Image (tube, rainbow, N blue to C red):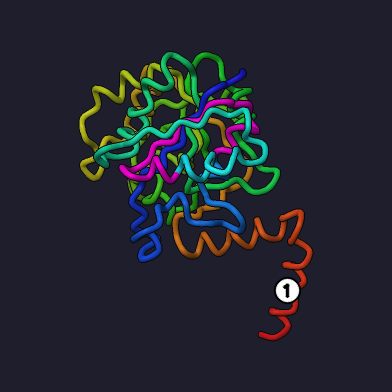
Amino acid sequence: MNVEVAVVPAAGRGTRMRPATRVVPKAFIPVVDRPAIQYAVEECVRAGAHEVVLIVDPGVGVLAERHFWEEGPLPGLSDVKITPVVQEVPHGLGHAVLTARQAVADRPFFCVLADNIPRPGGDVLPGMADAFHDTSVVCLRRLTPEFLERYGVIIPGTWRTEEVVEVQGAVEKPGAAHAPSDLGLIGRYLFTPDLFGILENLPPGYGGEIQLTDAISKLGEAGRCLGYVADQDLLDVGNPLGLLEASTVLGLSHPEWGAEYEAYLAGLVDLL
């Protein structure tokens, strides 16, 4: 399945990263040598997308345009159309995705959260595209109990392969006591455009917001959603510890500085 357009919701307020996000938008905090949002765009392009819609807060669209185009296109992105779309009021992730409706039109699309970055060589979008057969596909990971109150969790149905399962429903942040499974939604999606009609009619859910998880549940109930189980975790750069861990993993794999950084860390360990 060739997916030509992707949506990157990047309008979060970044409360887990305060005070850094008092001025700098969360998606523009650097991870090694580029902001998190650039990793998301590059991931989408590696999966075949040549158009990326960025959902941003008011005032951040200009910053996005400056970063991606002001001094000319970034390496590897010269043929990519990058379009900022403003989410005027923060009504939740589902509402953020809905704001991309006009730009996406009637095409299937990747949806990639900039908070999470795949490990080097660990892209999941191609596997999701392979699982796509005119139904939406969501990426899943098996979660330990403490994470079941932080992520949406699916109600699994029939397993079609060892890594693809039918999604019968989903619950936002249920906690270990109420989770219908240990299969959590980890911020990578491939949606059919019928998602927009569902989002448009959703009432507020968890936290009083329009929840993307609730729309996924509706798709699952209609037999319109599959889950693709990834074999490794993504790096969470939406919290300080996760940012440190991601910077280390990505720094060690950097083609220019990785070896020197590894030597530095080895020396640092010897001093501790």
Closest to the observer: 248 or 50? Answer: 50
For residue 239, what is the image quadrant? bottom left
Is 58 a magenta residue? yes
Quarter of the figure with residue 198: top left
Instruction: Answer few, some or many: residues within 10 Å of disc 1's Cα (few below 14, many 20 plus, some between 14 and 19).
Output: few
Tell me the amino acid under the disc marked 1: Tyr
- Give the residues drawn in magenta, as a range: 41-63
Q: Is residue 162 visible?
A: no
Q: Position of residue 49 (x, y in %)?
A: 58, 26
Residue 211 counted in the magenta span: no
**Residue 22 percent location from the top left of the image:** 34, 61
Q: Which residue is mark 1?
A: 264
Q: Residue at x 38, y 27 (%)?
A: 100
- Residue shown at the point (55%, 15%) measured from the top left: 133
Q: Nearer the viewer, residue 233 or 44?
A: 44
- Secondary element at tag 1: helix
| Residue 255 in view in this figure | yes
